[in-house]
Amino acid sequence: MKTTLLIMSILILVGCASKPDYRPANKGSTGYSEQKISDDRYRVEFKSVSNSVADAGDYALLRAAELTQAQGYDWFVVTNKETFVESKSHAPTSSVSATRGQQVERNCGLLTCETRTRPVNEMGVQISNHDSRKEVHTLLDIKMGKGIKPNDNSYSAQDVIDNLSAKAKK
């Protein structure tokens, strides 16, 4: 029973670690944060540890759109974008498996059959030194505006929210 709980805990942790969470960053942790530069300008950052560099960019855009609407604006322009990718040598990944079952042997002669059952317990450990996840920081400097979008380089806050919020909820 303890082995089963250990295995389930490891699988849950591995599954949760593979996708960046869209949430506010807490004291330098992964997630989003923003800094006000002026009334209509902000710097938005999204930090993640992920297999995908694109996720951090999408989540930074989503946060910029949410912030734009929260400040009473309709659209924003990205005036500067920086993405930093740091491949770290993470600790080796590992998995543990355990199987409990029975082995049934049946020996038959001319007149009778004899059946024997014995318990079988198998455990396995797999260790891998390969971890392709990267620490990704995407920084966006944005300028917000109201009314009609000024050009093709600007983003409608509502369109970005409509198109990217489902990705953040997965």
Image (cartoon, rainbow, N blue to C red):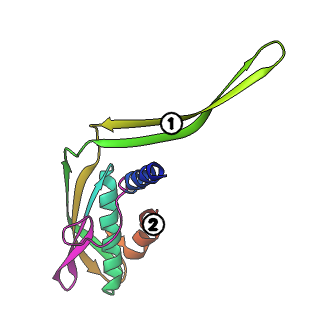
The residue segment tinted magenta is: 17-46
In the rendering, at what x and y percent does residue 16 appear? 39, 57
Residue toward you, 104 or 18: 104
Query: Can residue 91 be seen?
Result: yes
Q: Residue at x 54, y 40 (%)?
A: 100
Q: Which residue is mark 1?
A: 121
What secondary structure is found at the residue carrying circle 1? strand
Q: Which residue is mark 2?
A: 169
What secondary structure is found at the residue carrying circle 2? helix
> Is 37 on the left or on the right of 170, as rendered?
left
The amino acid type, in three-letter code, at marker 2 is Lys
> Is 3 on the left or on the right of 46, as rendered?
right
Q: Quadrant of residue 151?
A: bottom left
The amino acid type, in three-letter code, at marker 1 is Asn
Q: Quadrant of residue 32?
A: bottom left
In the rendering, at what x and y percent does residue 130 appear? 28, 38
Name above or below for residue 107 compared with residue 123. above
In the rendering, at what x and y percent does residue 70 appear? 34, 84
In the rendering, at what x and y percent does residue 28 appear? 19, 68
Q: Residue at x 61, y 35 (%)?
A: 102
Q: Quadrant of residue 150?
A: bottom left
| Other-residue count near label 1 (Cα within 10 Å), few / some / many at <14 / 14–19 / ≥20 | few
Residue toward you, 40 or 97: 97
| Other-residue count near label 2 (Cα within 10 Å), few / some / many at <14 / 14–19 / ≥20 | few
